[in-house]
Amino acid sequence: MSELQPEESYVEEPEGVEPGEGTEAEELETEDSLGDPEDSESAPDSGENHGKSIEFSEEQQKIFNEALGKKVYKLREVERILAAKEKENEELRAKIPEQQRPDVPDVPDPFALSDEEYRKQLADREQALIQQAHYDAVQEAQRAEQQRLIEEQARLQQEAMMESVKTYATRAKQFGVSQEDLQVAGNTVAQFGINDDLVNYILQDDHGPLITKYLSQNLTELEGLTQMGTAQAAIRIATEIKDKAAALKPKVNTAPAPIDTPQGAGVAPKSKGPKGATFE
């Protein structure tokens, strides 16, 4: 499944303290300030809000931007750690060919050698066995460390991807793209087999959900991206497709609601009393 078709809910769970992030209480306060998305999603959909973007107040938008900035900081921190781990991997790989496993000579023949020569060769063989055992232990430790770094790198990459998907889903909600519409658009884009690097580029773009939606509706454009290299495709998205995708953002009607007019205003009151009676 492509990451452009997130199955996760738009609701983000409160997180612990991360580098560059506030306390858990501050995270909960941020979510409370934006309202409770879970309450709105569990309520019956009247259809009135479908396809409309969410309007944040200036204060809510500031809180959202700060929360998003923390996510971006965390992603950059993960990227820095990954680069450091890759450098460690390269240093380990560079050390391995420099050493050779010591050879252990055969057991000397006591009948073919003098006592002194026999004892010397026996001692040399014992020393070679010690060196070989030490070499094997070092190699095993290096292999274990390499495997640990590979697993940690995979974990950090997965963590970075999850953060990207969460941010991507949050942006989709802000743009008024429902989870169902995003899933359908992501399925369409995934069927064309764009590479993972380009998927990551779209996930991290501030208009990522709209880009996915646009590409799902313009298959010729989407197919063209699959024929390009990642860098060339990213340039095309940034310079041409992004502006077209931004046009898909729902237009919000900012006109004030009509003023209620009292019923019957301007109509002469009816006379009271029995039918046919006149009053002077």
Image (spheres, rainbow, N blue to C red):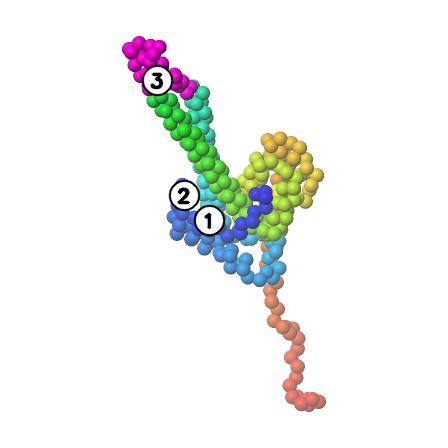
Q: Considering depth in this image, is 119 or 37 the residue closer to the camera?
A: 119
The one of 125 and 28 positioned closer to us in this rendering: 125
Element type where label 1 sits in the image = helix
Residue for badge 2: 18
Q: Is residue 101 magenta?
A: yes
Task: Please name the residue shown 66% across and 77% down the image.
Answer: 268
Q: Is residue 137 left or right of residue 230?
A: left
Circle 1 residue: 63
* The C terminus lies in quadrant: bottom right
The 10 Å Cα crowd at callout 1, few under 14, some 14 to 19, many 20 or more, is some
- Report the amino acid beneath label 3: Arg
Q: Is residue 239 above or below residue 274?
A: above
Give the class, few, some or many, for how many residues have Cα within 10 Å of label 3's Cα (few <14, many ≥20): some
- The magenta stretch is 99-127
Task: State whether residue 155 is above or below residue 96.
Answer: below
Q: Quadrant of residue 198?
A: top right
Question: Residues under labels 1 and 2: Cα distance?
Answer: 17 Å
Residue farthest left in this picture: 116
Q: Is residue 270 above or below residue 224?
A: below
* Residue 59 visible: no
Q: Tell me which label, 3 or 1, sits earlier in the chain.
A: 1
**Left or right for 16, reference 65:** left
Query: First in sequence: mark 1 or mark 2?
Result: 2
- Nearer to us: label 3 or label 1: 3
Residue 126 falls in image quadrant: top left
Q: Please give the label number shown on residue 125.
A: 3
Looking at the picture, which amino acid does disc 2 mark?
Glu
Which of disc 2 and disc 3 is earlier in sequence? 2
